[in-house]
Amino acid sequence: MILGLLGKNISYSFSQNYFTNKFKLLGLTNYDYKIFDVSSKDHILELFNIPDLLGFNVTIPYKQDIIDFLDELSPEAEKIGAVNTVKIVEKKRIGYNTDAVGFKNSLVPILKPHHRSALILGGGGASKAVAYVLNQLSIPFSIISRSGTTTYSNLTQDTLTSNHLIVNATPVGTFPNINDFPPIPVEFLTSQHLIYDLIYNPKETKLLQLGKKVGAQTKNGLEMLHLQADNAWEIWNK
C-alpha cells in the first residue's frame, strides 16, 4: 500500500522517516510512504493514478487547492476549509483535517489564564485550522497577513501587548531560511507571551529565539506534527 506527502519544496519533511519507522515497528512490509513534491497544483490529479494509493498527507501550499480534487470532505474539514489528510476508499477521495486536533491537543496543556486573545500570523490552510481551534476554545483572534484586513504594517505595540498568544502559521523561518521570521515588531514581545510556531525544522526558529530572549513561553510544531500524523494513521486504517 502506498501513502505519502503532497507539497512543494518539502525535502525537509519529517513525515517519510516517521511513517517508515512506524511501518517497521508494526511489521507492515507491504506499506511504503513517498514524497510527492509537485511544483504546481496542475499536477495533483496525477497522484490519483498511482496504483495501491491508500491516501496521503497534504502540506504547504496545497491544503486548500486539494479540495477541488476531492469527492467528499469530513465535517471538520468542511468547516475549516482546508485539508491535510486524504483517504481513498473505492476510488472515492475523502478529505480530512487532522491539523486541528494536533494543534488543540498540544496547545491546551500550556495555555495560561492571561492567554485570552491571539494573533494568527498567516492566512493559509494551516491558519484556518488554528482559527477553528481558537474558536472552539473561545479565544478571540486576529489573522495577520500581507494582504488581508490586518497586515503586518498595521501592528503596533498595543496590538502585541493586548494579544498574549501568537501563533505563526506561515512557513517563514523554515529550514534552510533559519534567520527569517515574520515581520512583527518583536521589540514589543514580553514574558507574558506564548509564542507557538507551527514550524518544526529548525527546532527553534528565529521567532522563538527572539521570544525566549525576553522570557516568553515558546513552543514549536513538532508535537502537533506527531499528533496530526497519528490521527491521519487512524483515519487511513478505520
Image (cartoon, rainbow, N blue to C red):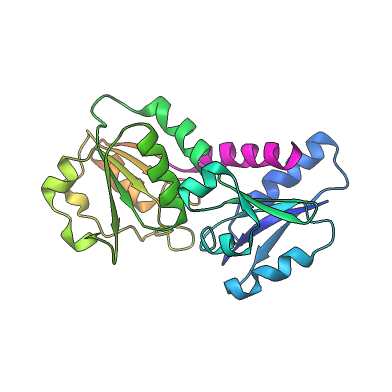
Which of the 4 quarters of the picture holds residue 110? Answer: top left
In the picture provided, is 57 more to the left or to the right than 164? right
Q: Position of residue 224 (x, y in %)?
A: 51, 39
Outermost residue on the right side: it is 30
Which of the 4 quarters of the picture holds residue 147? Answer: bottom left
In the picture provided, is 171 more to the left or to the right than 2? left
Between 111 and 218, the residue placed more toward the observer is 111
User: Looking at the magenta stretch, what is its main secondary structure?
Assistant: helix
6 drawn magenta: no
Q: Which residue is painted at 26% across and 24% down in the image?
A: 113
Q: Position of residue 53 (x, y in %)?
A: 79, 56
Q: Position of residue 20 (x, y in %)?
A: 75, 46
Examine the rendered structure and indicate whether residue 18 appears above or below residue 112: below
Between 207 and 234, the residue placed more toward the observer is 234
Q: Position of residue 89 (x, y in %)?
A: 77, 49
Examine the rendered structure and indicate whether residue 104 appears above or below residue 74: above
Can you see residue 98? no
Q: Which residue is painted at 23% across and 40% down in the image?
A: 214
Magenta region: 220-238
Q: Which residue is painted at 58% across and 74% down in the image?
A: 40
Can you see residue 59? yes
In the picture provided, is 22 more to the left or to the right than 134? right
Q: Which residue is painted at 25% across and 35% down in the image?
A: 215
Quarter placement of the C terminus: top right
Number of numbered discs visible in the structure rendering: 0
Which of the 4 quarters of the picture holds residue 52? Answer: bottom right
221 drawn magenta: yes
Between 74 and 191, the residue placed more toward the observer is 74
